[in-house]
Amino acid sequence: MSKLYKIAVLPGDGIGKEIVPEAIKVLKRIGELYDLEFAFEEAPIGGAAIDSVGKALPESTLALCQKSDAVLLGAVGGPKWDFLPAPERPEAAALLPLRKGLGLFANLRPVSVFPALVGASTLKPDVITGVDLIVFRELTGGLYFGEKSRRPLDSGEEAIDTLVYTTPEIERIARLAFEAARKRRKKVTSVDKANVLESSRLWRETVTRLATEYPDVELEHMYVDNCAMQLIRYPKQFDVIVTENMFGDILTDEAAMLTGSIGMLASASLGGQVALYEPSHGSAPDIAGQKKANPLATILSAAMMLRYSFNREAEAQAIEKAVVAVLDEGYRTPDLMEQGMKAVNTEEMGNLVTQKLR
């Protein structure tokens, strides 16, 4: 009897409605090939949920996610909802409470440069060829979750954002990074701003202490501004990067461009019983509905789901190999297009990957 996996599907806004079906198509094919059964149940989130029920994260959507085996998310947000107060916009009112409701404290973003896409990057081929790193970003602490306030001044206003981290919050994300490094090239780069921030000094002290439990893993510390520079100068020096919430948010978008397009960057958010998988890009409202979106990040996120939530390594690798095969044959969505390549739309790219699965 085949194993049944329940997946909550949250297409969201913009191109989310175009890319998520392509990942589902690929997962269904994997189910046929490997005798797995997937039950997909869709729910609204983000701007689409505001429009339909008046709330970016309806209680029914969160409940569905909590009772599922994994969550597949598209993207949320767009200019249509920018008139709302910041706490009520889809990005803040959907993603942050969803992460909190599922207990997700670690975001994983692998950054691998596919050989066929070396020419798609704006960096020199010798700089990015062979890049293979993963970023562990802490998801539930720092400035994004700290207390926020404003108060009047004679000259206007003062805005206050509070940056808070505790030892247990730092330990749990660092431990995941060290464990991952043991299965990779055994190097962790911890990124902070310990020369300025007290929270970063606690971060560095905690990671240094924890490293004694992993004598087989090399630990280096790097200031965030230097790390931003080194990602462009010599990205091959990195194996596992671990950092706090805001630094990770910025660095992962920078690292995405090593691959040629943020449309290639998958991600997983882990920590609770139910993990969340989503592409790293946004809702891209400027191209929504035009079949220009690159679905590969979402398809690769589905591969991460198979690997991390379902412990299905062979199936995950099958998807990744299918993506490589399609790229090697020269098929490209507009974000990756180079001279001499074959242009395809969102749906065609999903079909090609599905056909490559054996």
Image (cartoon, helix red, strand yellow):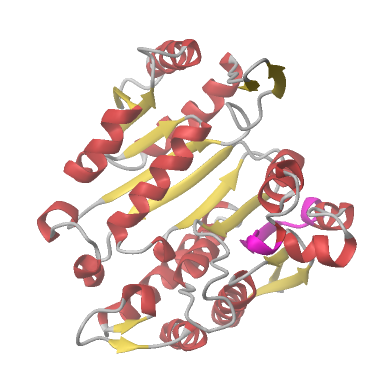
> Where's residue 349, x and y in %?
44, 83
The image quadrant that residue 126 belongs to is bottom left
In the picture, the quarter occupied by the C terminus is bottom left
> Where's residue 24, x and y in %?
61, 75
Outermost residue, left direction? 126
Residue at x 77% of width, y 55% of height: 65
Is 134 left or right of 99, judged from the image as shown? left
Is 7 left or right of 321, judged from the image as shown? right
In the picture, the quarter occupied by the N terminus is bottom right
> Where's residue 196, x and y in %?
39, 13
Residue 357 is inside the magenta segment: no
> Where's residue 35, x and y in %?
61, 77
* Front one among 253 and 129: 253
Residue 76 is inside the magenta segment: yes
Residue at x 27% of width, y 84% of height: 330
Q: What residue range appears in magenta?
A: 65-80
* Front one among 353 and 163: 163
Residue at x 24% of width, y 52% of height: 131
The image quadrant that residue 209 belongs to is top left
Q: Is residue 234 visible?
A: no
How many badges with numbers are in the image?
Answer: 0
Q: Is residue 167 visible?
A: yes
Is 211 above or below relative to 261? above
Outermost residue, front direction? 155
Is 53 above or below relative to 272? below
* Front one among 71 and 69: 71
Is 145 left or right of 125, judged from the image as shown? right
